Image (tube, rainbow, N blue to C red):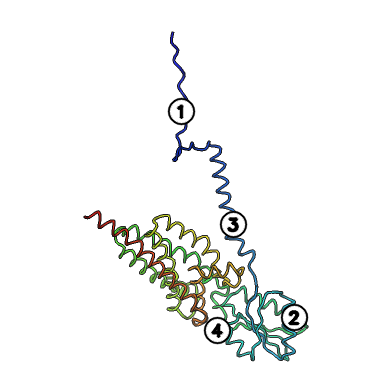
Amino acid sequence: MTQTPPPATEAPAAAPGGRRPLPPLARLVGMSAGLGAILVLLLAVFILPSLKSGAHDLPIGIVGEASATAALEEAVTATAPDAYDVERLASRDALADAVRDREVVGGFVVTDDGLEALVASAGSPAISATLGATATAVGETAGTEVTLTDIVPLPEADPTGIGIGGLAFPLVFGGIVPVVAFGAIFPRSTRWRLAGLAGFALLGGLLVAAVLRFWFGSIETGFWPVAGSMALGIGALAFPLAGLKQLLGGKGFTIGAMTMMFLGNPLAGIATTGAWLPSGLGAFGQVLPPGAAGALVRSSAYFGGAGGLVPGLTLLAWILVGLALYTVGTRPAAARSAAADA
């Protein structure tokens, strides 16, 4: 009697390239390890900059008689080592003008009556609070009276600056989502996709400025400059992402969007300014569109545009780069379309 041999166990299908796939347990362990590494990286990117943030080499001015300012500079250095880069100015008015022009973040004036600290909470609530705390500590040590003067205050309706400080995520959202949306409704028309991005950037700038002005009360003047700054920020995010998508496809868009979300967002320093972040990270964050847009909006909202030239040029450069990428990516697609029609 012939026995039927047992059915052979089916070997797992070979992976591309002729390699056999890893066993399920190995794949599970590998995927878990990879996801864990990504989680640690996200924690580092989003939390580490805040942990390491603080006052470092902040430009400040000091006014007073030579002997008094020398003693004050020593006291400030002893109270907050490496926190300030001190510059001596001729008068209190000169210091106040330097604060308004964003040449310094604040400063101290030594008088016969005591010590006056000049700050600009609209520039950064964190920095102005640190300057005030330093002045208080120096005054207590010297046994002198301390006066705090806010040269450029925040509006009464938003005394902590939350309105502008929270713009990082809306900026990134406003740059990423329209690329997907207009790409979906105009899959074959590059002209209408670009028109949609430009139109939404303008509309988004107006909407954000209107909310900040008429709803939140975060700005009291400079409605149109703030709207223009936000429009530039949204465009500086949207056009490069659209260009990467046109040139490299979905992978290019994904890489660009992840860079803006996971680097541009936490390193923007919009709530505190880039000067508050660790020096290298803060400078890098100001090169990316969210950081540059935040700096330009703050300059437009509270300082009459002072300090906004570099951020504005940075945003324009991103828009031009995005349009260049889009143009280069469109040419091969047009050539393929012409070849198919022929």
* Residue 10: mark in rendering: 1
Q: CA distance from mark 3 to mark 1?
A: 43 Å
Q: CA distance from mark 4 to mark 2?
A: 26 Å
Q: CA distance from mark 4 to mark 3?
A: 36 Å
Name which residue type carries label 1: Glu
* Residue 182: mark in rendering: none
Q: Which residue is mark 4?
A: 101
Q: Tell me which numbered mark, 1 or 2, is placed earlier along the sequence.
A: 1
User: Residue at position x 39%, y 64% from top?
Assistant: 325
Q: Element at badge 4?
A: loop
> Residue 299 vs residue 141: left or right?
left
Q: CA distance from mark 1 to mark 2?
A: 80 Å
Answer few, some or many: residues within 10 Å of disc 3's Cα (few below 14, many 20 plus, some between 14 and 19). few
Q: Element at badge 1?
A: loop
The mark total stands at 4
Q: Tell me which numbered mark, 1 or 4, is placed earlier along the sequence.
A: 1
Mark toward the viewer: 3 or 1: 1
* Residue 75: mark in rendering: 2
> Residue 13 vs residue 165: left or right?
left
User: Residue at position x 73%, y 91% from top?
Assistant: 112
Q: Which residue is nearer to you in this view: 205 or 35? A: 35
Name which residue type carries label 4: Asp
Dots 4, 3 in contact, CB < 8 A:
no
Instruction: Tell me where residue 55 appears, x and y as whole percent.
Output: 65, 73
Q: Tell me which numbered mark, 4 or 2, is placed earlier along the sequence.
A: 2
**Residue furthest front as drawn:** 17
Q: Tell me which numbered mark, 4 or 3, is placed earlier along the sequence.
A: 3
Quarter of the image with the C terminus is bottom left
Q: Which residue is mark 3?
A: 43
Answer few, some or many: residues within 10 Å of disc 2's Cα (few below 14, many 20 plus, some between 14 and 19). some
